[in-house]
Amino acid sequence: MADAALRPDLSLVLERITDGFFALDAHWRISYMNAQARKLLHARAECIGEFWLDVFPKARGRLFEREYHRAMRDQRPVQFVEYSATAELWLEVKAYPSLDGLSVYFRDVTSRIEAQREVERTTWRQQALIDFGRAALAGATFEQTLLDAIELLREILDANVVDLYHYDRNTGTFAVTHSMGWESGASLELAQPPLEHIASVVRTGEPFVCSDLRIDPRARSLAQLERSGVLSCVTTLIGTLAAPLGAIVAYQSQTRTFSVADVRFVQSLSQSIAEFSSALESNRLMSEVLESIHDSFVAVDADLRITYVNGRMARYWGQTPAEIIGTPMTAYAEHFDAPDGRVMQLFKEAQRERRSLTFEQHFRGRWYEVRLYPFGSGVACYVRDVTARRNEQERVLELNAELEQRVGERTTQLELANKELESFSYSVSHDLRAPLRAIDGFSQALLEDYGDGLDRRGKGYLHRVRRAAQRMADLIDALLQLSKVARAPMAFAQIDLGMLAGAVASELSESDALRAVDLVIEPGLGARGEPHLMQIVLANLLGNAWKFTRHTENPQVYVGKNSEGEFYVRDNGAGFEMSYAGKLFGAFARLHSADEYEGTGIGLATVARIIHRHGGSIRAEGAVGAGATFYFTLPG
Amino acid sequence: MGKPYILLIEDNADDVDLTIRAFEKNHIANEVVVMRDGAQACGFLFDSQRAHTTGWPALILLDLNLPKVSGLEVLQRVRAYEETRLLPTVILTSSKQEEDLLHGYRFGVNSYVRKPVDFNEFVEAVRQVGLYWLVLNEPPPAAGGGGM
């Protein structure tokens, strides 16, 4: 090959090929170099005959030197791709040895290599981002995630310095939380505003990219960073304009035109951090909620594998959440399920049919309310101990049953008592009267058959015996009525007290036709009451009015209703002393002697009892010789 | 027997005497046959041998509150038995319980008279009952005079 120059035809060919070519003789001197080689390698034409490493000193010790020597030693061709510092290009080199020397062909493959490297870098970045996201999901701490991000920026973006800023929502300011790569103390300067790159990303939401901080008019204050050894940067916002979380700044020590891919990489990293942060936040909120509730909680995925368990449930199962998460739900069946596996069945049902289920389960002597909610492809399960409530319920049921039984017993007792009372009043009416009849009858027989043997006084005594028997018979009848009104069933109806009073009054007038009583009945005395019982009330009150006006001139009786809604019966008869008003309504209470005004003393007691059975009240007003008024109410 | 007799079913001796006295005072001369409880009354009424000799009473006066067999039961049996079911029967009692009245009429009593305590009133009541049932009222053919 050293003779190549001697062969002009060959030389012509070599000059024409697009590859660079040079030849070395056996003493490693350049014997030939074509124009392309000279151009690519910036070599002078006079270099022919010079030792090759004197011409290309930068090749010394590099792959070029090693490969060429290997080729000569082995006498075999070599081929390689290497960056040539001389050419500042990537070169693909083929060298063919002979005993005379070495022929070297090379071509510029820089664009191919760059493209290849770009693909590699992109793939690498994507993989890095995926790995980063995966690490975050796998439960890495946020702090670890941030450190990973910084490491990635340094590794993949060749960033010399990385700052992470945290946005404080309360103060609305950014502050550095992580700072890597500064010469000691340099980052402190940075903490001082104005931080134009931060301000920019916060204002626009777009990345701030600067290839030379010294000359960028947008970031004059950042020019001083040259002193700290940084010249270019990429700054991106973490989070959104509406809800910023922080910012990333990646600096480089050289001026650098960041590619779209570079910027996108930083943006992707920011986004991953933001997503991780919000996931953490919602996780934190969720777990705060789930840990604070009084329910035990467990969540399973589609395969009934536990994805979350709160502390309460974990304690109950005797393990830590970390130990439980990831294991199949069935592994803990003994801690919650009935022997027939009912709970697990219902889990599967909720999972399969995507519907909520709520049920109560008895387990080891306690009652639990279990609520199953399908979510995503899994099931969330809340468990609450409702033993106390169940016990309460059962107690209430028991009490109710007991109460009912007691009511039943009382009712039976009451019915019995009523029956007894019934037969008592029967015997009162029947048996007590028989002896009275005998007393009266035989007194009369005595008067009739043996009256001649008695003087006036004796006959008088027998008459008094008879009168007493009569009176007792009346008393018995009155008592019977009193007991009857207390027990009579109440059949309420709309009644006209005026009409009832009119009917009673006409009976009274008939029975005492010699007397003329001036009776006034107000219109509009409608009320709700038991008609039969109210008739007894009016019969008694009007009967009294009739009786106690017996010695009154121009006797007057007034039936009406006052402004307070009280009905009243007023007479201008004998009246009574107000201090005895309270005694009027007791059984056998009498304010007058039987000689003056006959009566059993039970009439008003009967009236009061009837009014009370209506839920009303009764009172009396009067004065001796000035008449009496009886007021009563009927709330029905 | 001459005049048709009255069957008085009454356990109280005083009442028996007073009732008989009331009849006498009203000049009702019919013989009064007294039964002191319900069982005795039924034995008397439904003994075929006796019915053959004494015949049926012209009037039954029946107290309600009787030992052994109650007045209402006697009434029911009188009304259930073909030969006695048309006999004029009057309840003469102290009770004026609604229930007794209702049952009495439901079981087919002809009258219900409450014995007044006042003997004069009692005499008057007996007079009216006797007058009505023994004099004014035409008895049903089968239950009429005795001596069958």
Image (cartoon, helix red, strand yellow):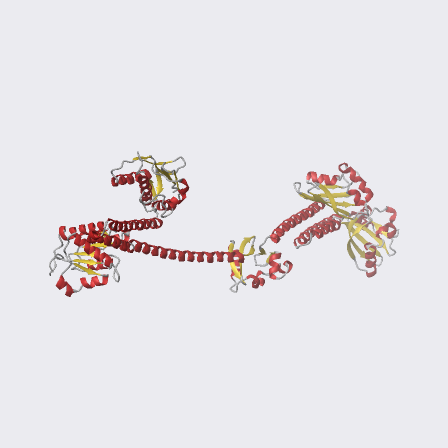
The quadrant of the rendering that contains the N terminus of chain A is bottom right
**The one of A147 and A614 positioned closer to us in this rendering:** A614
Is A423 drawn above or below residue A35 in the view shown?
below
Q: Is residue A253 visible?
A: no
**The one of A308 and A534 positioned closer to us in this rendering:** A534
> Splitting the image into 4 quarters, where does residue A214 fall?
top right
- Image check: A354 left or right of A407? right
> Splitting the image into 4 quarters, where does residue A566 fall?
top left
Query: x, y percentage for residue A310?
Result: 61, 56
- Image check: B110 left or right of A34? left
Q: How many marks?
A: 0
The quadrant of the rendering that contains the C terminus of chain A is top left
Can you name the residue that lies furthest to the bottom here?
A: B49
Query: x, y percentage for residue A86?
Result: 83, 48
Query: x, y percentage for residue A390?
Result: 51, 57
> Splitting the image into 4 quarters, where does residue A576 fall?
top left
**The one of A621 and A100 positioned closer to us in this rendering:** A621
Query: x, y percentage for residue A377?
Result: 56, 54
- Image check: B72 left or right of A285? left
Q: Is residue A280 visible?
A: yes
